[in-house]
Every structure is written in structure tokens, then in C-alpha cells.
């Protein structure tokens, strides 16, 4: 199983805002969410006299969720606008009520009702177009945003929301600098839209960033080998104390393991010692335990 070419810790989102030119009073708001755009990328593009986003204010870094995921980051950001919480962390997640893993199949991404997928006025629909866009994400993203702007110009809603997923795909395939053409096209498209409709303010934000750098190591094979050596039973549902449910997704360098609470300390110790695993964290009675193979750390909550 091979991971994406570019990956890394997701740390920051970016927020930019721009009002209408010439001091006109804005009548509408265009809110654009660009998936997985790093703060440093936008900061770099904004520098200098010839930089992009000249009509916008300076980018503002925001702390995203850790590990980051669109499914939980967007409800955290856009909850005040009415976006509900997601039922799980990713298309494959552990259902605590059923005590079993859900999703992970080729169609589960669209079968499980994640509210952010139906929240936006403009977003790319369906698995077929997802696959087509993945072949050339930059070109597809620029074209998709152009269509979104056409819809915005023809619409009369006071707030028009757009979600662009192709930035995430392009970042993983080409690295953070591979986003430059798409981000410049977003800036130019918004500037052109100002000439065609009533005054509006534009807000750009991202749900998480993308560090780039070296590809991450897929630690899932080593984890499964450690489970087999320890006599654990990897399964889709918890029925016996020795059962373990894994929820690998996307970047499998970071995932969860669920077990009976009585065996969690031993499981965490063995997973923390697996090849390639840096940290394994689990909740204890009064705080958190962190296992790292060669060390063990406890964080305890106190009344003060």
C-alpha cells in the first residue's frame, strides 16, 4: 500500500478577507473553503509587489485539529454558520454505539452522512467526478472554481459558500508549491467577478494545512505484525478482550486502535514499540499515557 507523494503533519489553516474595491458597501459575502492549503504557501504567494491576494488582508494562521481531518475541522470552523458535527472522524471510523468499524468501502465516502458534504452552495458531487478530477487536479480545480464563480455571480443569496477539494489532491501529488497556479487562479477569478456583480466581500479559508517534505512511512504493516506477535485479534467489532479494531484511512501514518479498556495499557505499549511508530497515546483513568517504544509518559489531570 503506497501513500501519497507529499504528506506531513497538518498544522495550520489560513484565513484571508477582502472587501469590495473603491470603498463600496458590500452587499454579499463569498465564502470559499480551499481544502488543505498551508498558511506558509499563501504567505509566500502574498509577498512582494507582484504577489497574489493584493486585495486581501494579510493571511491569518489558525490552529486545526490534530490529527487533522476535513470531517471534524470544518464543523469546528463553520459550526456558527449551522454546520453540524460529523458522525465520525473519516469515511472509515469506529462507531462507539455499535462498537464496530464503519465505512471504508468504495462508496462509503458518500453513503455516510457527513454534514459538511451537503453544507456548501457549490461543491463537487459524486465519486465519478472525484476520480476524473484526481487525474489533473490543478486544471480541474481551476475549471471547477470558474464554474462556482459563474453560479455566484448569477445568484442573489447574501452568503454564498464554495468548497474546493482539488487543492487537497494537488497538494498531495505535487507538494505545497504545486498549489500556486490554482491559488493564483482563485485570486484572479475573484477579482474578475467583482467587475460583473454587486459589491461583495470575499473570505478564503482552509480546514488544515500540508507540510510537504519527505513521504510518510506506512506503519500499518508493522502494527499488524506487532498485533499478531502479541496474540491480538484484529477484527471489525469488539466482542472479546483480545479484539482490536483499527481505523486506517488515507494517510495511514496516523490512525486509531480500539480495544477493551482493561487491556489498553498493554496494547499501547506493544503498538508504541512497533517499527516506525513514534507515539501511541491513550486515555487512562485520570489523564493520558504516551508510549514511544523506548519511553513511557503519563499526563495526569489535577484539581488545580
Image: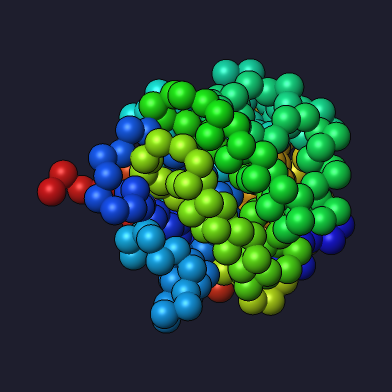
- Quadrant of the rendered structure where residue 98 is? top right
Instruction: Determine if residue 223 is in view.
Output: no
Q: Is residue 132 left or right of residue 83?
A: right
Q: Tell which of 152 and 8 is nearer to you.
A: 152
In x, y percent, where is residue 278? 59, 67
Q: Count every numbered label the image shows and give the total.
A: 0
Along the line of sight, which residue is nearer the eye, 56 or 270? 56
| Image location (x, y in percent) of residue 282 | 49, 48
189 with respect to 248 (left or right): left
User: Closest to the observer: 153 or 106?
Assistant: 153
Query: Residue 250 versus residue 47: which sits nearer the camera?
Result: 47
Q: Is 218 on the left-hand or right-hand side of 44? A: right
Please report the residue visible at 60 percent of the width from the left and 32 percent of the height from the top: 151
Give the residue drawn at x 85%, y 44%.
Answer: 132
- The answer to whether residue 144 of the structure is visible from this angle is yes
Residue 130, image x, y percentages: 79, 40
| Position of 109 relative to 15 (above/below) | above
Residue drawn at the location 33% of the way across and 53% of the way down: 21
Give the farthest residue toward the bottom: 48
Vertical comparison of 153 with 184: above or below:
above
**Residue 14, x across and y down, in percent:** 43, 57
Amino acid at each position: 500500500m503506497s501513500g501519497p507523494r507529499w504528506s506531513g503533519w497538518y498544522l495550520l489553516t489560513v484565513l484571508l478577507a477582502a472587501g469590495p474595491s473603491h470603498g463600496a458597501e458590500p452587499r454579499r459575502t463569498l465564502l470559499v473553503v480551499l481544502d488543505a492549503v498551508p498558511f506558509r504557501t499563501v504567505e509566500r504567494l502574498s509577498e512582494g509587489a507582484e504577489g497574489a491576494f493584493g486585495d486581501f488582508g494579510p493571511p491569518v494562521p489558525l490552529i486545526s485539529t490534530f490529527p487533522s481531518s476535513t470531517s471534524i475541522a470544518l464543523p469546528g470552523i463553520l459550526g456558527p454558520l449551522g454546520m453540524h458535527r460529523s458522525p465520525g472522524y473519516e469515511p472509515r471510523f469506529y462507531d462507539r454505539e455499535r462498537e464496530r468499524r464503519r465505512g471504508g468501502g468504495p462508496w462509503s465516502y458518500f453513503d455516510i452522512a457527513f454534514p459538511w458534504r451537503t453544507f456548501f452552495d457549490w461543491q463537487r458531487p459524486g465519486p465519478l467526478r472525484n476520480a476524473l478530477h484526481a487525474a489533473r487536479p490543478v486544471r480541474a480545480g481551476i475549471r471547477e472554481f470558474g464554474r462556482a464563480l459563474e453560479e455566484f455571480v448569477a445568484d442573489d443569496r447574501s452568503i454564498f459558500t464554495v468548497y474546493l477539494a482539488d487543492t487537497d489532491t494537488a497538494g498531495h501529488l505535487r507538494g505545497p508549491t504545486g498549489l500556486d497556479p490554482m491559488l493564483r487562479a482563485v485570486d484572479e477569478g475573484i477579482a474578475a467577478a467583482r467587475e460583473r456583480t454587486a459589491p461583495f466581500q470575499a473570505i478564503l479559508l482552509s480546514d488544515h494545512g500540508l507540510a510537504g517534505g519527505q513521504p510518510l512511512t506506512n506503519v500499518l504493516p508493522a502494527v499488524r505484525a506487532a498485533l499478531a506477535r502479541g496474540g491480538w485479534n484484529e477484527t471489525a467489532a469488539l466482542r472479546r478482550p483480545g479484539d482490536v479494531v483499527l481505523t486506517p484511512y488515507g494517510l495511514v501514518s496516523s490512525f486509531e486502535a480500539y480495544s477493551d479498556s482493561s487491556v489498553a495499557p498493554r496494547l499501547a505499549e506493544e503498538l508504541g514499540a512497533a517499527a516506525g511508530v513514534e507515539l501511541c497515546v491513550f486515555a487512562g483513568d485520570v489523564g493520558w499515557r504516551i508510549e514511544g517504544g523506548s519511553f513511557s509518559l503519563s499526563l495526569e489531570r489535577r484539581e488545580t
